[in-house]
Amino acid sequence: MVFSQVVELLNTIYSIFDVRIETYDVYKVETIGDAYMVASGVPNRNGQKHVGEIATMAIDLLAAVKQVALPKSVGKGHIQIRVGIHTGSCVAGVVGIKMPRYCLFGDTVNTASRMESSGLPMKIHCSHPTYESLHEIGGFSFVPRGEIDIKGKGKMVTYWLKGRDDMDEFNDSMVCKFVPKKKRTGTLLTDSSSTLISKSQSSTTDVNPMEDLIV
């Protein structure tokens, strides 16, 4: 793809994501290149809802991106993404003078990024803390990935998030049957716990002490 096509494709994907995440109690942290970071539990407090919000959103976005086809000039196929989720503490605050931004810092952010980079296309890769939090809530299904080497972290036990009871699974990717409730009003949260999700796109012809992040 030429550069202009890459920019147009990313704009399409990010526009879809921006609309979909409005359904959930999450906060879009930033986009860096083809990475899209979302958190729940910051800056608005939502008790223990953060992990469920992020997990459901991840499944929803995985289904949504399946509708995005590659440019005809590239060939047949659809866009694929990797998703990584981790739950833990982080530090958050507004930094900068000229262009101040609300930023997240800490090991939780790094681990969410590692979950994404060590994942596989069209799969949701979760850390053990995220698995435990979702298991406690109930209604989500997993497949153990086992113990793997994570760059900068050593060996970690991780899981694939397969779906939830009110969603269908088809050919190892999520088909969302679940119709989310209309946009909810968030509560300002400064709890250090949140869940982070980190997503990265690839084309194919292919603060509360707990925070959930998706990258």
Image: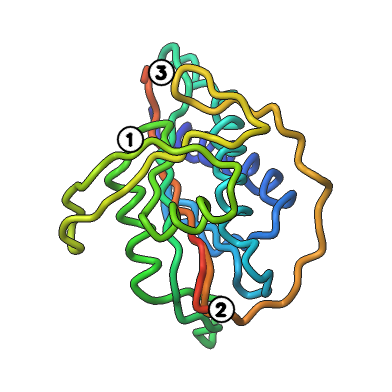
Residue holding disc 3: 74
Q: Is residue 85 left or right of residue 49?
A: left
Q: Amino acid at mark 1?
A: Leu
**Mark found first going from the N terminus, 1 or 3:** 3
Expressed as whole percent of the image width and height from the top left, the position of residue 145 reads 29, 39
Circle on res. 120: 1
Between the residue at mark 1 and the residue at mark 3, the CA separation in whole angstroms equals 22 Å
Q: Amino acid at mark 2?
A: Asn
Mark 3 secondary-structure assignment: loop
Between the residue at mark 2 and the residue at mark 3, the CA separation in whole angstroms equals 45 Å
Expressed as whole percent of the image width and height from the top left, the position of residue 84 reads 41, 49
Q: How many marks?
A: 3
Residue holding disc 2: 208
In this view, which residue lies farthest toward the top? 76
Crowd around label 1: few <14 · some 14–19 · many ≥20 (10 Å): some
Q: Which image quadrant: the N terminus?
A: top left
Q: Is residue 196 left or right of residue 202?
A: right
Closer to the observer: label 2 or label 1? 2
Q: Contact (CB < 8 A) between labels 2 and 3?
A: no
Crowd around label 3: few <14 · some 14–19 · many ≥20 (10 Å): some
**Mark found first going from the N terminus, 2 or 3:** 3
Between the residue at mark 2 and the residue at mark 1, the CA separation in whole angstroms equals 30 Å
Relative to residue 166, is residue 199 depicted above or below?
below
Residue 72 visible: yes
Question: Which residue is at the front of the view, 160 or 110?
Answer: 160
Circle on res. 142: none
Expressed as whole percent of the image width and height from the top left, the position of residue 5 reads 47, 32
